[in-house]
Image (cartoon, rainbow, N blue to C red):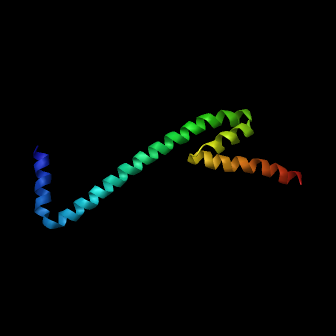
Amino acid sequence: MDFFYSIVSFFTSGGIFMLPILVVFAFGVAIAVERYITLAIVTNKNQAVWDKVQPLLTDGEFDEARKVTSDDESTISQVLNMGLSLQGAVRRREDI
């Protein structure tokens, strides 16, 4: 309890200048929590898509991998879809 009273004493001795600092701190904590939650959700979505696509890529089933990544809106599926769409284009260019 002494720790709490020392924090309150420090805040009150700072006067009016401590109020803007407290507001900025509250905004910083809110942004940090929001970013953590958002990144956790995105990470889970990306991991779920990767768990579906990775075995397909290992087995060489690129057409099926293209279908899975084109149906999903996660970040990793968009990147993989771009790469897989170029995969066929590179072969055609080498044949020319």
Does residue 69 sit above or below 89 in this rendering?
above
Does residue 63 sit above or below 38 in this rendering?
above
Task: Locate residue 59 relative to residue 23 in the image: left or right.
Answer: right
Q: Nearer the viewer, residue 7 or 64?
A: 64
- Placement of the N terminus among the 4 image quadrants: top left
Residue name at image x 61 percent, y 45 percent: 77
Q: Residue furthest bottom?
A: 17
Task: Locate residue 6 relative to residue 89 in the image: left or right.
Answer: left
Residue name at image x 41 percent, y 51 percent: 35
Counting from the top left corner in percent of width and height, residue 60 is at: 74, 36
Counting from the top left corner in percent of width and height, residue 21 is at: 23, 62
- Snapshot quadrant of residue 65: top right
- Placement of the C terminus among the 4 image quadrants: bottom right
Q: Nearer the viewer, residue 67 or 10?
A: 67
Q: Residue furthest front?
A: 71
Residue name at image x 10 percent, y 56 percent: 9
Residue name at image x 40 percent, y 47 percent: 36
Task: Report the number of numbered marks.
Answer: 0
- Snapshot quadrant of residue 66: top right
Q: Residue furthest right?
A: 96
Task: Locate residue 81 relative to residue 18 in the image: left or right.
Answer: right
Counting from the top left corner in percent of width and height, residue 40 is at: 45, 43
Counting from the top left corner in percent of width and height, residue 78 is at: 62, 49
- Snapshot quadrant of residue 56: top right
